């Protein structure tokens, strides 16, 4: 028997204003005004996403640091209070269980945000492996609402309703503030390639989401002058793909090793023992057979997941994510290809509806970083 769809705190707003669909078991807004205008609002101004479907856990206790250093690949010891980093959890074979952002709120208090599709799996994994550590792992997703405010005018928008100076919070740093009079924490991270913040409204329940509604509405009002758009998961997907960011279940999974996914920068082999370390050492020594690459279409066509990538008469890879890029105005894709073909500028063909369409291998992100993204020149 199928499980009933799950809902998030602002379901009422989304169901009235947006086009709803099922994602990872949740009823979620796919778009409001449309994917392209929402996408471009984030690239040029500011947008707000409700991402409360994602998993959130609090890890506390005297051995919280040691526990998290054992179950994740990045170096938790190097994480200072009110700092965050991107990391992975791997299985014993070195496959990726999930990717996530970990924040250290206090010396013995950590906050982990992972993918909605893995909420139950990740919590079970953390719970099982916490045995033997003096640590508490608390599932907190339904008591903390989560919004992403993204775009070059994200800071300007949030500052209007914040009591703290948000410019002091640097990229991958965290802080506490009041937004529209409501206690909240924020981290300067995101899944769009743009500057922006993740906003966490604590102690708000699914049955009484008043505080979450107040913050959401206040952000929309504060961003009116800048041209803010409420954004759905459709724009979130096109934005993350333009930025070259992985989607779990498409671009990475338990059959993917971090090195072929170009995520080796979060694998700290020198930090000591952690789950999957021995397998990752072996895989690094063996070398790669394939690599994750960006593909830009040179002819008309939108590549989709499972499309084959060809070079001359040889199949050399497969697309894992694909879309039409609102910025580039052409089809783009993420794919895994044989290592020898993972060369910027290499011409390939993507098989779309039984037709081989011209394309080229390109580096991430797809857009011009002097015009878009958090590194743009002001």
Image (tube, helix red, strand yellow):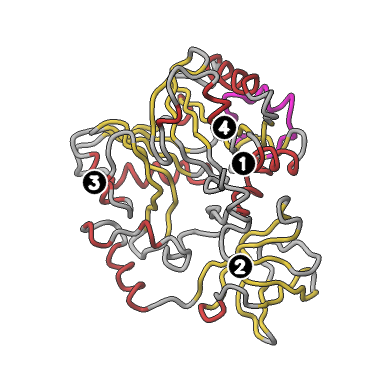
Alpha carbon separation for disc pair 4 and 3: 30 Å
Alpha carbon separation for disc pair 2 and 1: 41 Å
Q: Which mark is residue 77?
A: 3
Q: Secondary structure at mark 1?
A: loop
Q: Which mark is residue 154?
A: 4
**Mark closest to the chain's N terminus, 3 or 1:** 1
Inspect this view and state whether residue 286 appears. yes
Front in this rendered view, residue 328 or 62: 328
Q: What residue sits right under mark 2 in the picture?
A: 362
State the image coordinates of residue 208 (x, y, percent, origin top left). 54, 15
Which of the 4 image quarters holds residue 277? bottom left
Image quarter in which the N terminus is found: top right
How crowded is the residue under tag 3: few (<14 C-alpha within 10 Å), some, or many (20+)? Answer: few
Q: What residue sits right under mark 1 in the picture?
A: 2
Q: Can you tell which of label 4 and label 3 is closer to the viewer?
A: 4
Q: Secondary structure at mark 4?
A: helix
State the image coordinates of residue 16 (x, y, percent, origin top left). 74, 24
Q: Secondary structure at mark 3?
A: helix
State the image coordinates of residue 374 (x, y, percent, origin top left). 53, 45
Instruction: Give yes or no for contact between labels 1 and 4 (Cβ–Cβ under 8 Å).
Output: no
Alpha carbon separation for disc pair 2 and 3: 35 Å
Relative placement, left or right, of 239 versus 123 is right
């Amino acid at each position: 028997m199928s499980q009933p769809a799950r809902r998030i705190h602002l379901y009422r707003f989304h169901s009235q204003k947006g086009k709803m669909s099922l994602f990872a078991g949740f009823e979620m807004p796919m778009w409001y005004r449309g994917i392209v205008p929402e996408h471009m609002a984030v690239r040029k101004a500011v947008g707000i996403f409700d991402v409360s479907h994602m998993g959130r856990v609090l890890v506390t206790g005297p051995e919280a640091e040691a526990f998290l250093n054992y179950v994740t690949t990045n170096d938790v010891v190097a994480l200072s209070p009110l700092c965050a980093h991107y990391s992975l959890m791997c299985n014993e074979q070195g496959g990726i269980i999930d990717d996530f952002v970990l924040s250290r709120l206090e010396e013995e208090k950590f906050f982990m945000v992972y993918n909605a599709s893995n909420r139950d799996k990740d919590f079970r994994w953390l719970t099982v492996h916490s045995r033997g550590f003096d640590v508490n792992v608390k599932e907190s997703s339904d008591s903390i609402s989560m919004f992403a405010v993204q775009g070059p005018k994200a800071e300007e928008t949030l500052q209007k309703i914040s009591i703290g100076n948000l410019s002091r919070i640097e990229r991958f740093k965290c802080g506490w503030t009041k937004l529209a009079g409501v206690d909240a924490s924020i981290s300067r991270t995101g899944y769009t390639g743009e500057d922006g913040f993740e906003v966490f409204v604590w102690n708000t329940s699914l049955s009484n989401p008043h505080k979450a509604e107040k913050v959401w509405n206040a952000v929309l009002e504060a961003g009116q002058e800048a041209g803010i758009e409420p954004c759905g998961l459709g724009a979130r997907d096109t934005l993350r793909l333009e930025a070259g960011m992985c989607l779990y279940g498409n671009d990475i999974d338990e059959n993917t090793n971090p090195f072929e996914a170009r995520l080796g920068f979060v694998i700290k082999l020198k930090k000591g023992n952690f789950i999957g370390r021995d397998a990752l050492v072996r895989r690094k020594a063996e070398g790669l057979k394939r690599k994750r690459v960006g593909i830009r279409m040179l002819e008309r066509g939108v590549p989709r997941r499972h499309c084959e990538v060809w070079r001359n008469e040889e199949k050399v890879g497969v697309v894992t994510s694909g879309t039409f890029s609102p910025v580039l105005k052409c089809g783009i894709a993420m794919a895994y290809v044989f290592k020898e073909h993972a060369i910027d500028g290499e011409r390939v063909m993507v098989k779309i509806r039984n037709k081989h369409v011209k394309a080229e291998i390109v580096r991430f992100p797809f857009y011009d970083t002097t015009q878009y993204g958090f590194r743009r020149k002001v």
